[in-house]
Amino acid sequence: RAEPLLHAIRDFARAEDLPRLTGLLEKLGGREEQEMLLRAIGSAAGPEGGRTLLGYLESAPEGVRREAVVEALADLAKKEELPALIPALTRLLEAETQGRAQWQLARAIASHGPEGVAAVGEILARDPDPRRRGEVLRGLESVHPEEAAALARGFLLDPSPELRGRALKVLASSGDPAAPDALRAALEVETEPGLREAIAVLLKHREGR
């Protein structure tokens, strides 16, 4: 099994080992093994490892699984804030079409401290795709639930029913003290029966009735 070797690489590899590590990556076919080695690449080299992972995302060699690269980048962001990666990650997120990858990229961006949270907020403010905005909001929620809840209040009045529904889910799992007022205002104008019912149920729960 490759797992013991990959654990050793993760624990002891250095930045100068990157060329050999990337060569080994292309020989691994399984997603879990690739993901483990990609995480090791990020952990071993810090900023340089982050740039290597971004390179794989932008033009991954044949056989390197893109979803494994996204998982490794999100894992790297938990350990080390690399604000220099935010612009490239943002470009990738804005071009991404797969929901899970959008969520993971948003989570990775938001993990990079205040600059990352601000970048996610900008995407939420300007992106025209409600599905992507929903995944971005979900990614932000997984890292900074309070910031996500504050933004979700505004999305209760968004033209997209899908995004309004995502905002409700975020507020349902938050303790945001301003949520009841926003929910009452949304209930007055909501036209989708399912969303009206969900708002009413959430309000009743929040008000203790």
Image: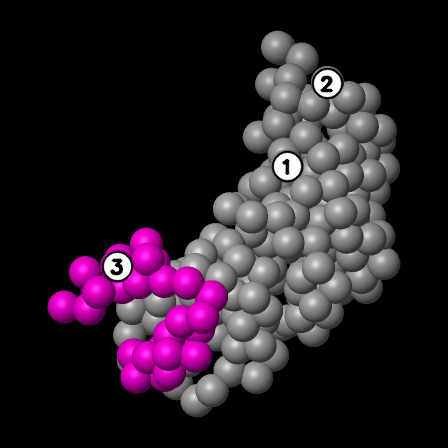
- The answer to if 22 sits in the magenta stretch is yes
Q: Determine whether the residue tagged by mark 3 lies in a helix, strand or loop.
A: helix
Q: Nearer the viewer, residue 26 or 140?
A: 26
Residue 182 in view in this figure: yes
- Amino acid tagged 1: His
Of marks 1 and 3, the one in the foreground: 3
- At horizontal 62% and vertical 10% (from top left) the residue drawn is 209
Q: Nearer the viewer, residue 167 or 150?
A: 150
What residue would you read off at disc 2? 177
- At horizontal 43% and vertical 79% (from top left) the residue drawn is 19
Q: Determine whether the residue tagged by mark 2 lies in a helix, strand or loop.
A: loop
In the rendered structure, which disc, 3 or 2, sits on the residue that comes first in sequence?
3
Region in magenta:
1-28
Tell me the tag on residue 8. 3
Residue 110 falls left or right of residue 21: right
- Amino acid tagged 3: Ala
Q: Residue pushed farthest front?
A: 16
